Amino acid sequence: MEKKLFNKYFIGITLINFIVYLIYYLLMVIMAVIAQDTLHASLSQAGFASGIYIIGTLLARLFMGKQLELF
């Protein structure tokens, strides 16, 4: 019997991955605006906050990639 690619596990993982990346990119885009409007940060402080977020997610991806290779 042939295995199907589009089974419920594949669709579930794809949907979860889409939601995670959607939240990541939405936060990346609006983080500087929220920092300026809500926290009254300067433009450089808002950019620094966005940069820290991007660097943090990059490091988390590298760390989790190593952890996933163990399985």
Image (tube, helix red, strand yellow):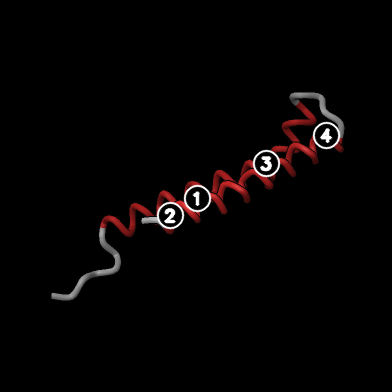
Looking at the image, is mark 4 or mark 3 earlier in the sequence? 4
Give the numbered dot on residue 45. 4
Asked whether disc 2 touches disc 1, contact meaning CB atoms under 8 Å apart, the reply is yes
Q: Residue at the location (86% across, 31% down)?
A: 42
Give the numbered dot on residue 52. none
Q: Nearer the viewer, mark 4 or mark 2?
A: 2
Q: What is the CA distance from the residue labelled 1 to the residue labelled 3? A: 16 Å
Q: What is the CA distance from the residue labelled 4 to the residue labelled 2? A: 34 Å
Q: Nearer the viewer, mark 3 or mark 2?
A: 2
Within-10-Å neighbours for mark 3: few <14, some 14–19, many 20+:
some
Disc 2 target residue: 68
Residue 19 in percent (x, y) is at 48, 47
Q: Quadrant of residue 32?
A: top right
Within-10-Å neighbours for mark 1: few <14, some 14–19, many 20+:
few
Tell me the element at label 3.
helix
Tell me the element at label 4.
helix
Relative to 34, say whether 4 is above or below: below
Asked whether disc 1 touches disc 4, contact meaning CB atoms under 8 Å apart, the reply is no
Residue 3 in percent (x, y) is at 21, 71
Disc 3 target residue: 53
Within-10-Å neighbours for mark 2: few <14, some 14–19, many 20+:
few
Disc 1 target residue: 64
Q: What is the CA distance from the residue labelled 4 to the residue labelled 3? A: 12 Å
Judge by depth and name the residue closer to the eye, 24 or 59: 59
**In the image, 55: left or right of 47?**
left
Relative to 41, say whether 56 is above or below: below
